[in-house]
Image (spheres, rainbow, N blue to C red):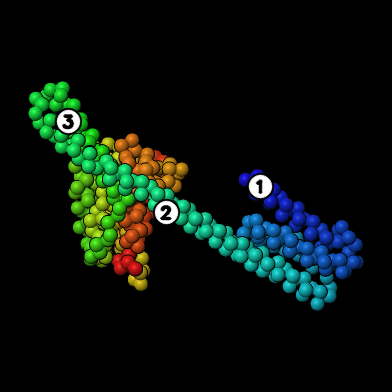
Amino acid sequence: MARRGWQALAVVLLTAATVSFHYGFLLPRSAHVLHAIHGRLCYIPIILGAVWFGVRGGLATAIAVTLLTLPYTLRITDRHTLIGEYTEMVFYAAIGLMTGILIERQWRERERREALQRELARSERLSSLGQMAAGLAHEIRNPLGSIQGVAEMLGDDAPQGSRKRELFDVLRKESKRLGAVVDDFLRFARPRPLNLAPTDLAVVVNRAVAQMQIDASARGIRIDTRVTPGLPRVQADAEQLHQVLLNLLLNAISASPDNGRIEVSAARVGRDSAPTVEITVRDWGHGIAPDALARVYDPFFTTRESGTGLGLSISHSIVSDHGGAIDIESQPGQGCTVHVVLPVKPK
């Protein structure tokens, strides 16, 4: 912020100095050649304003220079000289505008390159973590299955209500939870190829909501569904989209307060030349902090104590494979809205 202030001060001082030259305050007004040179010096603060502050900075400086030099034209009696002064003022605005446009284009290009670099770095991390997760899940899954089976058999022999039965119930519950974590690892590390077919999103949405209704009702949370009638069918893998919605609903239920509300909607968006369908999952829970929002798609990053941090990573990959996009809007304490946009006919 201090840097921007110094830059603005520099533009103001340069503008004042060049205008003073223009009026001949610092050099004799009779020195016409020097006056012409000093008139060209007015381009310096205009260009600097555009370089540092974009189009608005360039135009604002050009307008300031024009207004400050306008009284000088009242002293001019020669018609050709007057036309030259007015032409100069037009060039002030043109230079400020053109320089600002070029600079802002460079800013956007730099932001795009930085975004691509971040996405590339994220893809590399996903690849490395995926390989690690695949090996880990492979080594854990078989012995975990044996532990779960033994716990089931021994637990059935323990008397109902005994301490031993309670311990076996804990063992079964925790081994089942660990099995779910391993399954998430495998989905993340070895995603299934898409099985594309014409899919009715209304069916997918209603099925996911029905499956999560029990978990929501246990905490008094109401799930409202709004699906626009006549949605076009999309070319999609219904099972994988079902998994995406389960992940989003699970996060929404976890973030919502007791007796809260979740809204799930589906509607057609986009132009006829590129029709898309948007699924929205909204909750009014605790929301996501800005620093955490930038990392929600990173694998193993989670703000939930019982979460694996893979749900949104898997969902992001599935939606991307469909040629769609997933976007999250959230403010702490104001809930969270997730938008999933899918093309009707993916490329």
Can you say which quadrant of the picture contains the N terminus? top right
- Which comes before the other along the chain, label 3 or label 2? 2
**Residue 216 lies in quadrant:** top left
Residue at the spot of label 3: 169
Q: Which of 269 and 237 is in front in this view?
A: 237
The amino acid pointed to by label 1 is Arg
| Residue 37 image offset from top left, x and y in percent | 82, 66
| Residue 240 image offset from top left, x and y in percent | 26, 55
Asked whether the residues under the numbered discs 3 and 2 touch, taking CB atoms below 8 Å apart as contact, a structural biologist would say: no
The answer to whether residue 109 of the structure is visible from this angle is yes
The amino acid pointed to by label 2 is Ser
Asked whether the residues under the numbered discs 1 and 2 touch, taking CB atoms below 8 Å apart as contact, a structural biologist would say: no
- Which comes before the other along the chain, label 1 or label 2? 1
Q: Which residue is drawn at 32% across and 66% down?
A: 346
Rounded to the nearest angstrom, the CA distance separating label 1 from label 2 is 35 Å
Q: How crowded is mark 3: few (under 14 residues within 10 Å), some or many (20 or more)?
A: some
| Residue 10 image offset from top left, x and y in percent | 73, 52
Q: Nearer the viewer, residue 258 or 295?
A: 295
Residue at the spot of label 2: 123
Q: Residue at x 46, y 43 (%)?
A: 291
Rounded to the nearest angstrom, the CA distance separating label 3 from label 2 is 40 Å
Q: Nearer the viewer, mark 1 or mark 3?
A: 3
Q: Which residue is drawn at 42% across and 49% down?
A: 125
Q: Nearer the viewer, residue 140 or 206?
A: 140
Query: 277 above or below 82?
Result: above
